[in-house]
Image (tube, rainbow, N blue to C red):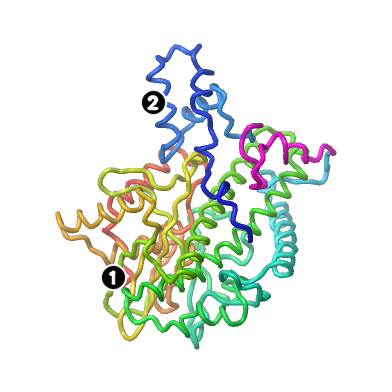
């Protein structure tokens, strides 16, 4: 894995020449100052509606296709026009079915995700073959690890909404997405044999939420797990784009392919930033570049989490942190652990101190707690359910829920709209406004 700082420190927002765009919309009726402010606001919106999209497209900002002067989608320090645009395959593949087209029938959808899974498995083989341990200056070969590699952990049964095929993302409102966990779903390759043991909680033996150095090491396993899937997912989608983009006739289907690839690229960049920051912190044995927010809660056996979390907005000033559909908004991730240890629940959040938005997020929640006591149990439960993919619900707890609750929790966990209508997004944000009310898994 190479450390390309010039790539890591950039995102789609920084790649846009705002002055150039501003000059291109001078002929519109909107005043100069208003145009510039509107452009800035759109690029930082939590949710872009159709009017926002139309304004950007009408004024020269390409959302649904890659601009010639963007940094290349292969993440090399080149412009798109000088690199991957030249690699687009001109020959039509009459048998190709895009993701959007595949949604027209169950058979075509199943064929599409089967094909993508096959490509993903081939990428994994290559990843394992050429990869080496994630620890700094360790060049040993990769071995299979498991994110929940604790002794006897899976003796208990858990339910999760994760699926074995990362491309199987079709979820139908009104159905239940949680299923019994197959431990293999948490297998990954990120470390050599020795370091795979070091990042395991079997070795770390975390006892409290303020064991920051140990939690940092545990989070290295999380980010290696996420990188393993994000990197190979990106590679499959990149290859699909290069080989088939010009084979798609419908503009809307082309647009969705580009939009999905933009999201994957943004996510991969943020994962890589955190990966290298943790790697550096462990090398120096210094975790001062990260901020920790800790809770030692009462004992419970209902749920556990070991994942990244992407907060949406700050609770007081409503500052946007992550967007559901704005490709110009940089992804920002934090780490979330909910671990049951020694008859108590250890809860830890960790994020880079350099992130102003994430600093503000936790600061504002603490301020709310001083103004009126926050129900931290419910707040933690909602973060785990809504904003992580990897929440594991204990079999007994899951079976205590009635059918309506199971459908609701499934929707809250997975119903993240790629192209939401304003009404749908309003319902989601109305729930966020009461984020410390409602669900309590403690």
Residue 232 location, x and y as percent?
66, 59
Question: From the viewer's perspective, is 34 left or right of 414?
Answer: left
Question: From the viewer's perspective, is 8 left or right of 311?
Answer: right
Residue beneath the point at 32% across and 74% down? 209
On the rendered image, what quadrant is the C terminus found in? bottom left
Q: Is residue 293 visible?
A: yes
Density class for disc 2 (Cα within 10 Å; few <14, some 14-19, many ≥20) is few
Where residue 85 is drawn, which disc sits there? none
Q: Is residue 168 visible?
A: no
Q: Is residue 302 above or below residue 169?
A: below
Where residue 37 is drawn, which disc sits there? 2
Residue beneath the point at 29% across and 56% down? 362
For this orientation, the residue located farthest to the left is 371
Residue beneath the point at 45% across and 68% down? 391
- Name the residue nearer the viewer: 37 or 155: 37
Question: From the viewer's perspective, is 157 left or right of 298?
Answer: right
Density class for disc 1 (Cα within 10 Å; few <14, some 14-19, many ≥20) is some
Q: Which residue is mark 1?
A: 295
Which residues are drawn in magenta?
68-91
């Amino acid at each position: 894995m190479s450390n390309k700082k010039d790539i890591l420190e950039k995102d789609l927002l920084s790649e846009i020449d705002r002055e150039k765009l501003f000059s291109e919309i001078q002929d519109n009726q909107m005043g100069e100052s208003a145009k510039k402010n509107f452009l800035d606001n759109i690029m930082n919106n939590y949710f872009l509606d159709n009017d926002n999209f139309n304004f950007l497209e009408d004024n020269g900002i390409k959302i649904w296709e890659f601009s010639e002067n963007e940094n290349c989608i292969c993440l090399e320090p080149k412009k798109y026009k000088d690199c991957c645009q030249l690699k687009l395959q001109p020959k039509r593949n009459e048998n190709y079915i895009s993701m959007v087209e595949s949604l027209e029938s169950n058979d075509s959808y199943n064929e599409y995700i089967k094909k993508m899974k096959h490509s993903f498995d081939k990428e994994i083989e290559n990843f394992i073959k050429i990869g080496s341990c994630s620890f700094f200056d360790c060049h040993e070969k990769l071995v299979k690890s498991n994110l929940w590699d604790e002794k006897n952990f899976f003796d208990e049964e858990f339910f999760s909404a994760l699926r074995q095929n990362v491309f199987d993302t079709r979820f139908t409102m009104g159905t239940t997405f949680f299923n019994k966990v197959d431990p293999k779903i948490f297998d990954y390759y990120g470390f050599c044999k020795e370091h795979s043991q070091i990042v395991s909680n079997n070795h770390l033996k975390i006892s409290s939420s303020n064991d920051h150095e140990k939690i940092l090491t545990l989070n290295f396993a999380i980010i290696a797990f996420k990188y393993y899937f994000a990197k190979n997912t990106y590679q499959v989608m990149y290859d699909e784009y290069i080989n088939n983009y010009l084979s798609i006739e419908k503009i809307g289907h082309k647009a969705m392919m580009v939009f999905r690839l933009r999201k994957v690229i943004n996510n991969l960049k943020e994962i890589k930033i955190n990966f290298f920051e943790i790697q550096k912190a462990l090398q120096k044995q210094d975790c001062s570049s990260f901020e920790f927010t800790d809770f030692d809660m009462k004992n419970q056996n209902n749920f556990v989490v070991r994942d990244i979390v992407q907060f949406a907005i700050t609770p007081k000033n409503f500052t946007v942190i992550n967007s559901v559909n704005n490709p110009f908004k940089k992804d920002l991730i934090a780490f979330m652990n909910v671990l049951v240890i020694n008859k108590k629940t250890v809860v830890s959040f960790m994020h880079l101190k350099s992130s102003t938005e994430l600093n503000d997020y936790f600061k504002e929640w603490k301020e709310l707690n001083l103004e009126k006591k926050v129900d931290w149990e419910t707040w933690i439960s909602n973060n785990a359910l809504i904003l992580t993919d990897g929440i594991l619900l204990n079999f007994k707890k899951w079976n205590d829920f009635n059918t309506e609750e199971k459908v609701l929790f499934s929707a809250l966990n997975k119903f993240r709209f790629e192209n939401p209508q304003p009404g749908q997004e309003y319902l989601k944000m109305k729930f966020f406004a009461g984020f410390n009310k409602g669900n309590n898994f403690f």
